[in-house]
Structures are given as structure tokens and as C-alpha cells.
Image (spheres, rainbow, N blue to C red):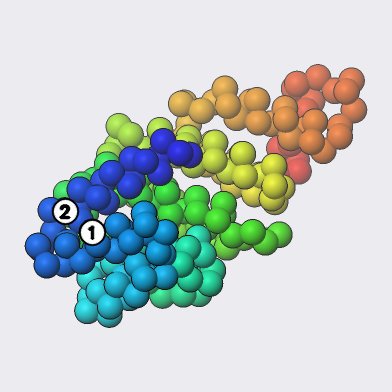
Amino acid sequence: GSELMRHVALVLYFLVCSAVPVAAQTLENALSLEEQGKPQDAVQIFKKLAKAGNDRAKFFLGYRYLKGQGVLQSVEMADQYLEPLRKNQVAFFKDEEESVVKLAIFIGKCYIECIQTPYVPDARAREWFLLAEKLSKPAQKSRTQAKIASFYERASENHPYLIDQAIYWYRKARGLASANLLTLRFRICERLHFSASLDRDTCMYQEEFLFL
């Protein structure tokens, strides 16, 4: 959660400072304005740069529309800026493979955590999670899948219908998350108020019957 956000912020700050000097200074100024408590002023700079084709500015602006930071919260406006970046696999990261995976997970989570409505735009979140999975190195893929599964499991406390996604991603994680999946199945049985007399094997059978 907070550790991932700090990492993403540091990566983005580095990218801002290492970009073309004029654009970097302007982005840096926008971030500085936010730190000074002037988010609306920062948004105006992001919009100007985004209109000029600056992908980093599009990311910052799209994320702020998701958060409702300096602008009215709008998934539609967030999509307008973030979707082109997702479709070109956040190309402005270039060879920063590990960073783009973390960024994709970060945005996917925000589509669920940042939206305060009974039904969140999970379809869009899944697209970002699938991008994170696609861009993960083979040795890291199962770990990425397990992180996504764990997030969905936590999110299901507020949005119970997301439990299916937790099961889906735990199963994709294969060996790494087998114990987590067993635990998750047992929690599902408890959440669905199965009889306490059911043993774990019966509980797992009931879960398979309900969710497959």
C-alpha cells in the first residue's frame, strides 16, 4: 500500500528530473505546487503539458482524476489520459521493466480503492493488472500474480463480488500461492456461513461447486 506508493512516487520523481529540461522543470513545478497545497494550479500545468503530448503529464493527470485530487473525480476523464498509456504499455518507462509493473499494479489498485461507490470499475483495473502480469519477467510472474490476488482478497471485504478475482489470480500464481488459496477457500466458507461442522475438504468442495 503506502510502501508501493512511495516507490512509485520516487520512480516518477526520478523520471521527471531526468526528462527534457524544460518539460521536467514544469512537471517539477507542478509537483511542488501540490506540496504547497495548490493542487488546482498543478492540474493546470499537467493539462497544458498533456495537451502538448507529454506522457508523464498524462499519467499524473489521469491519476489525479482517479483520486479526485485537484479536480472532480471522474473515471471517464481518468480513462481519457490513462488508456492510451496502457495500450502502449506505458512506453515512457522504456527499459524500466520492474517500475512499469509496479506502476501498472498501482493504477489497477486505484481503480478499486480510489472510487468510493458500491461498484468499482474492476474491468479497467483488470486490464492494468493483466499488463503488469504481461510485463513481468518469467521469474517474477508468479509473484506479481500473488500480489494481485492478495489485493483482491483484501478488497473483497468491501466489495464481496471481487472474491472471484482473488480466486482467479491465486490459481494463476500456481505454486507460490497454493497455501494462500487453501486459506482463502476456508475463509470463503466462513463468509458464506457454511455449517461449522464442515471439515476443510468439504468446505473446499463447496467452494469449488459455487465458484467454478
* Residue lying at 89% horizontally and 20% vertically, measured from the top left: 197
Please indicate whether residue 123 sits to the left or right of residue 70 in the image: right
Q: Nearer the viewer, residue 206 or 49?
A: 49
Quarter where residue 3 is shown: top left
Residue named by callout 1: 28
* Residue lying at 54% horizontally and 69% vertically, measured from the top left: 73
Please indicate whether residue 105 sits to the left or right of residue 30 in the image: right
Q: Nearer the viewer, residue 141 or 52?
A: 52
Res. 50 visible in picture: no
Instruction: Kindly give the residue lying farthest to the left in the view shown.
Output: 21
Q: Local crowd at mark 2 within 10 Å, few (<14), some, or many (≥20)?
A: some
The image's mark for residue 17 is: 2
Q: Nearer the viewer, residue 31 or 126?
A: 31
Taking 196 as reference, is 7 above or below it? below
Q: Nearer the viewer, residue 110 or 20?
A: 20
Taking 48 as reference, is 3 above or below it? above
Helix, strand or loop under label 2: helix
Res. 141 visible in picture: yes
* Residue 10 percent location from the top left of the image: 28, 44
Tell me the CA gap for discs 2 and 1: 7 Å
Q: Quadrant of the C terminus?
A: top right
Please indicate whether residue 18 sits to the left or right of residue 212 in the image: left
What is the three-letter code of the residue carrying label 1? Glu
* Residue 164 percent location from the top left of the image: 64, 46
* Residue 111 percent location from the top left of the image: 52, 58
What is the three-letter code of the residue carrying label 2? Cys
Please indicate whether residue 166 sits to the left or right of residue 18 in the image: right
* Residue lying at 9% horizontally and 62% vertically, measured from the top left: 21
